[in-house]
Amino acid sequence: MDIDTILALLQSIGICITAVWAIWRFRIESPTKPRIELALDAEFLGPQAGKYLASVSILVRNRGTVSHTIDGLELKIQGINDGTKVESFEERSEKLVTEGDMNHRICFPEKIVELPNLIPPDYKYYFVRAGVEQIIHYHTAIDANIRFVRVFAAFHYKGSQDKHTAEKIFGLGQGSRT
């Protein structure tokens, strides 16, 4: 076997190894795909003069290897008054979908906060670097007659219409109110 044949064989092996690595790295591992976790927490302080001070925390955790830009961060807070019957969408005849279990979701009829974009206009966007946890706070006051709240947050990656969402239900106060 001459040197040219050996070099050609080594080049072929090198190209195959590189192709396998590229497929593994960019197809299977997908380092550029979004790997963001979204979580919610809230703290309710009060009552104070008929209101609870509410501090909502939106946690955006980037577990990926690239930075991500968020150009829209939606926040909704809805409530159920103390003593109000708990109903699903199906019970209220407000069908969400024709199939599936979505109609069994609980209705929160009181709209407390409905912000299509929590990001201040002069900021234009938030970014979350790889390996970083970004906490975004929102503070508001909720009437003391509200017993439970549903907090919903969603964002779009910059340039995408895909929504990443999180929601959680919280109780305000403990036991009966006077």
Image: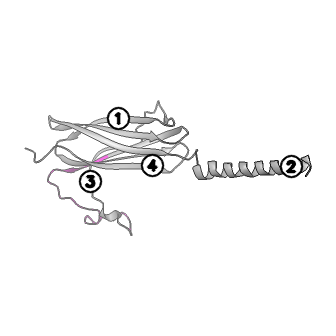
Q: Which residue is mark 1?
A: 137
Instruction: Say above or below: 64 vs 23.
Output: above
Between disc 1 and disc 2, the foreground one is 2
| Callout 4: SS | strand
**Which amino acid does the dot numbered 1 rest on?**
His
| Callout 2: SS | helix
Whether residue 173 is visible to the viewer of this picture, yes or no, is yes
- The disc, 4 or 3, on the residue closer to the chain's N-terminal end is 3
Colouring rule applied to residues = one colour
Q: Is residue 75 left or right of residue 52?
A: right
Q: Is residue 116 left or right of residue 94?
A: right
- Which mark, residue 164? 4
- Which mark, residue 6? 2
Q: Which residues are magenta?
A: 77-98
**Which amino acid does the dot numbered 4 rest on?**
His
Structural distance between the alpha carbons of marks 3 and 2: 73 Å
Q: Residue at x 80, y 51 (%)?
A: 12
Whether residue 115 is visible to the viewer of this picture, yes or no, is no
> Mark 1–mark 4 contact, CB under 8 Å?
no
